[in-house]
Image (tube, helix red, strand yellow):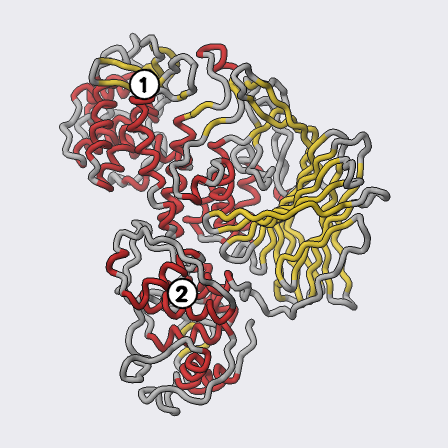
Amino acid sequence: MRKIGGSLVVFLLVFTFTLQVSAQTFSDVSNHWAKSEIESLTDEGVILGYEDGTFKPDAQVTRGQFLAYLVRALDLPAGNSAFPDVPTGSRLYPDIAAAKKAGLILGNADGLAKANEPVTRSDVAVMLDRAMQLKGDYKKRAPLTFTDAAKIGQYAYGAVERMTFYNLIRGTADNKFEPAKIATRGESAVFIHRLMSKLDLLGNSKDPIEIPKPADNQEVVIPIHDYQYVKVRINTRGVPLTYNKQTTDSHVLSTDTHYYYHMGNASKPLGSLQVTLRKLDNGDTFIFTKFLHNGDNTYSASVIMPFSQSDNYSLAKYASHGTVDQSHNSTFGVDKTSHPTGILSVKNGSTVTNEVMMGKNYISVQRQTNYANGQRSVIRELSSELESYNLYTDQARKLVTAHQNVSVQSKAISETWALVSEKPLFANATNRNDWFKRTILEYGSINNWLTADGAYTKLPWSIEPGYKMGYGRNIGRLQGGIYLTAYNGNKERYFRDLVINAVADLDVFSGGAITAGKSPIFKTEYTSTWLKNTYGTTAPYIDTRHNENAALFLKNTAEALAVSKLADANLRYADFLVNQKSLGNTIAVTPTSYLIADYYATGSKKTHVSLNHALGEMRFLLNTYKQTGNADYLKTARELKAGIENLHPKWIRASGDLWYQINGSLVFSGNDYDWLTLMDLLLSQNAFVESGIERSTIFDEMIRSKTKYLVDHNIAIKGQIILLLQEQGFGDLVKNTSAADASSPKLNEEDLPKDTLDLLAE
């Protein structure tokens, strides 16, 4: 809770129709997009709820109310004068007086505050700008790319440029600023939260502490806030750590600060230490630690996190909910990783002061194969996943300390990670435990080895260089669709943190292209021996399916988190698909029709095309055409449609089933999915209607053949797909077919199984 200044005390005594209700009791914010910020600012005492247990996030805000939020957020001293239209008896007088004294409000040409008038988004930008200038020299500007930037008044234009640069203003998902729109309570909470996060004012209920100096030359101390720091120590005697340099990288919604140290004698170091603090827009911080040891001995080290003004803790462990089944997989072999340790809840009495998701310690060796063209394939060979930690409580000093112990092994890389928050990472134990259980059951699809460079996950055996314990940065796993889906379900803080971390990972992988607003085309950095042996393709190469994964994730993140900078991610990928023909990454079917190959690398043979993915690309382009009206997207979608149609009836096998793929020599092969491609064909027909394209009679023949094959071979069909078949006139084929699952008697697209685009996004 923030300190309540004199002006706010008076305000609370007079302004009686609201009170500070715990955010968890609000009946109208559980599914609101600003839930996290509302809860945070309610806990801070900056924004209050109503006596009926609601917050009213969509209610409009006045100029005076927004100024009151700023006064509380900045904890401004009381003023002694206001404006003629704000008399001393007004409930807003204390806050308006404090705002006037600080220069947050100057009054209009008539010297009036107009405190009861609705506050526009332009007004908000001006007030935020003045608040920022109170706290420092925040004068940098960002060129405005909002589609309605011309509508921003001259009085606010500079403020909008500055607040856009400092990420307090991000625009809407369709890249508009909407300068005349009246701000709501929910939007105001987000604006104020961003301000407080930028100024390090969130969670500042703790008193500042003196950041200690290193005890000796074997440890480093790095501040996180003025009341929080992390210490990294080499426990083995005689191994000093010497400062080298510090760098900073900005990402969308997060910032990385990297600290580099020499390990051993600086003139002839044994290796290096890199500590990265990835600070998110909500104040949560990932701590990534990486030791690179070139020497011959094994050392002991610890990542130490002290939590002041705390006197007890609890630890919720993943292992309490089961054991990961690390059995052999025919494609990936055995994955020796598991899951994080769990969530450490640090408390003062019964109040949570910090929570930490504690990762494990990963020991690996970088392996690479160099090629004659100067390129290379890079992976990590995992040696071991280790778990060692200590937790201490010093009641006299009111101090809880967590030690993550690290094994710094010879000729290896040793990494660990933690996520530190001043708020609970989960709103309740049920959601937390459900996620822990899901992680154990689905550990092969949920990342656990996190680094500042991105998550490392198990790779197939068919990689070069070939190691059974080969791990790498898989683009399909770097993107955080699985976490975004979870966040959209219950708005938990931990999932939002993982989404933002995934955006940063993709930005790092693309060399900053996402933050720069460029078209990020992600190249796979390890070689598939199957692609190499079949087509001569080596790393780096473009996997169109992985790029579609990433584009859909970024687009969906833009919508879920209202991040305008990511709003065009799908457009950039659509442009990439349009350009594939000029790049030569297509399989020509006729002079005017083609399919886009699943993989592309300069100098390699033409690779194959998967039918379900070709359908997904076509629908992706049609959806983007509906969004933009860009005729290039429609033209390319039509050419892909024609490419599929012109290969008919060869797509249909003698059994009536469909082939999975076709290669550059127009040879078909592979077993199709049971019902995924069928659903893609049905949804494609709907997409044609929505785009003004005539229904495809050839697609109908493929649908009929595939459905008859499934029925004849007693292969179960999902209930909603049966309804889709009935809706499109294929009911005669499934009239005696029972659904494979319980399903609504009415067609509901929300209940359809995940199609290719859904699976790619997730």
Say which amino acid is labelled 2: Ser
**Residue 398 in the image, given as x and y percentages of width and height:** 73, 66
Quadrant showing the N terminus: bottom right
Q: Residue 691 carries which label?
A: none
Please identify the quarter of the rendering in which residue 214 is found. bottom right
Say if 651 sits above or below 152 in the image. Answer: above
Residue 486 vs residue 294: left or right?
left
Q: Which mark is residue 586?
A: 1
Q: Which residue is drawn at 34% across and 45% down?
A: 567
**Residue 282 in the image, given as x and y percentages of width and height:** 50, 57
**Residue 367 in the image, given as x and y percentages of width and height:** 63, 24
CA gap, disc 1 to disc 2? 53 Å
Secondary structure under tag 2 reads: loop
Please identify the quarter of the rendering in which residue 264 is found. top right
Secondary structure under tag 1 reads: strand
Q: Which mark is residue 27?
A: 2
Instruction: Evaluate if marks 1 and 2 touch, with contact meaning CB atoms under 8 Å apart.
Output: no
Say which amino acid is labelled 1: Thr
Q: Which of marks 1 and 2 is nearer the N terminus?
A: 2
Number of residues whose C-alpha sits closer than 10 Å to that of mark 2, classed few (under 14), some (14–19) or many (20 or more): few
- The answer to whether residue 320 is visible is no
Q: Which residue is drawn at 53% across and 81% down?
A: 5
Please identify the quarter of the rendering in which residue 750 is found. top left
Q: How many numbered circles does the render carry?
A: 2
